[in-house]
Amino acid sequence: MSVSISRQSARKISLSACVALAAAATFASGAAVAGDTVDAQLKFAMQRDLGIFPGQYAQYLATERLAQSQGRAIEREFGSAYAGSWIERNADGSFKLVAASAGARKSSSIGGVEVRNVRHSLKQLQQSMDLLDASSRARIKGISKPLTGVQSWYVDPVSNSVVVKVDQGALDRGIDFVALSGADSGSVRIEETPGTLQTAATIVGGIEYSINNASLCSVGFSVTRSSTKGFVTAGHCGSAGAIVRIGGAQVGSFAASRFPGNDRAWVSVGSGNTLQPWVSNYSGGNVIVRGSTEAAIGAAVCRSGRTTGYRCGTITAKNVTANYAQGAVYGLTQGNACMGRGDSGGSWITSAGQAQGVMSGGNVQANGNNCGIPASQRSSLFERLNPILSQYGLSLVRG
């Protein structure tokens, strides 16, 4: 069996200075408006964490809008050869939208899209992903060989592979897991990554709340269900009925919760509480929540939580399966904004104010966070917001 193994998760991607004229026109026409729509504190955080400077905001936002508006169209155009799309940064600091094809396609009819030819289609990669998930679900506690050391797995269109992340020194366990699953080893890459995968609720995280006066997590986003007020958060933070306090005052309780399998929950609060369409930037201000449109791989995204505050990074993978000690969680999104224990349930939001999800977990080191791990090796996982809203019949509070 041949499994491609990398000891560093940094992806070496060939860069191109080629940008289609149609995209250039879009960037030019939208530059002033796009630049003005970015919150000042968010600009600071994007510059600090991502190196996106003032002159680059408008071009980045235009690329983000192109990814959101044309993602489905690219998938339809490429058909069965479609192998994913993502936002990528050029060597000169500009951004572009890349689409991959497992066919012989050399270009796209959609302006501003760079096409790359790859070996595996997204469907083929998903087949390997499905086999890994099925193998995880079929394990019997106390009988099956433990998956200790295997952190997570997901389809990565950027590297055109299914990435299996393992603890440092646990490569053999990753190889065994892939072999037993029956997944195509030629489509799998195993990566060692620092830290160990943990949920982030052990010590304490948006703004902080406590559960049954025993543990701490972070508020995700304000929501309503008919006339009932509440907020979404991570399922591992508390079970249905658990009492929630903010600032020492009892505000409500967990109305529903699911973990593992998923990591989603919502808390109902009393009518006397005020819901705001904001995410704290931990600098004395707030980012306004505008909606919940999901961003593309490569898009800038920031997260807010009580332990590490407001941190930014990019989306690096989608549909990630996390192998927590309590059981596997499926369908997570991975970013590289740093996090720590206590940030659980906290908000993930884009530069345009689009709510993405709630903090689930990450490859936490002994110091309780993964901020000391290079961004290229950082796994910070969040549960997508829209499925939470759909499952529980919730409406997002927007500004």
Image (cartoon, helix red, strand yellow):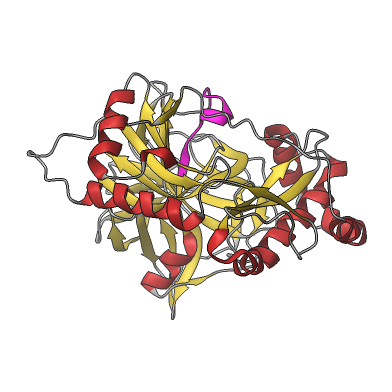
Residue lying at the far top in this picture: please name it. 169
Estimate the x, y position of residue 143 in percent, counting from the top left: 7, 39
Identify the magenta region: 371-381
Estimate the x, y position of residue 8 in percent, counting from the top left: 51, 24
Q: Would residue 377 be counted in the magenta stretch?
A: yes
Which quadrant is the C terminus positioned in?
bottom right
Estimate the x, y position of residue 265 in percent, counting from the top left: 35, 59
Residue lying at the far left in this picture: please name it. 143
Residue lying at the far bottom in this picture: please name it. 226
Task: Give the quadrant of residue 21.
Answer: bottom right
| Apparent side of residue 319 relative to residue 130 in the rendered image (left or right) | right
At 30% from the left and 51% from the top, the residue drawn is: 131
Estimate the x, y position of residue 168 in percent, counting from the top left: 37, 21
**Residue 326 visible:** no
At 74% from the left and 34% from the top, the residue drawn is: 51
Which of 330/255 is in front?
330
Total marks in image: 0
| Apparent side of residue 399 relative to residue 217 in the rendered image (left or right) | right
**Residue 311 visible:** yes
Which of 149/197 is in front?
149
| Apparent side of residue 191 relative to residue 78 in the rendered image (left or right) | left
| Apparent side of residue 96 relative to residue 293 in the rendered image (left or right) | right
Task: Give the quadrant of residue 103.
Answer: bottom right
Residue lying at the far front in this picture: please name it. 104
At 43% from the left and 60% from the top, the residue drawn is: 232
Task: Give the quadrant of residue 77.
Answer: bottom right
Q: Would residue 51 be counted in the magenta stretch?
A: no
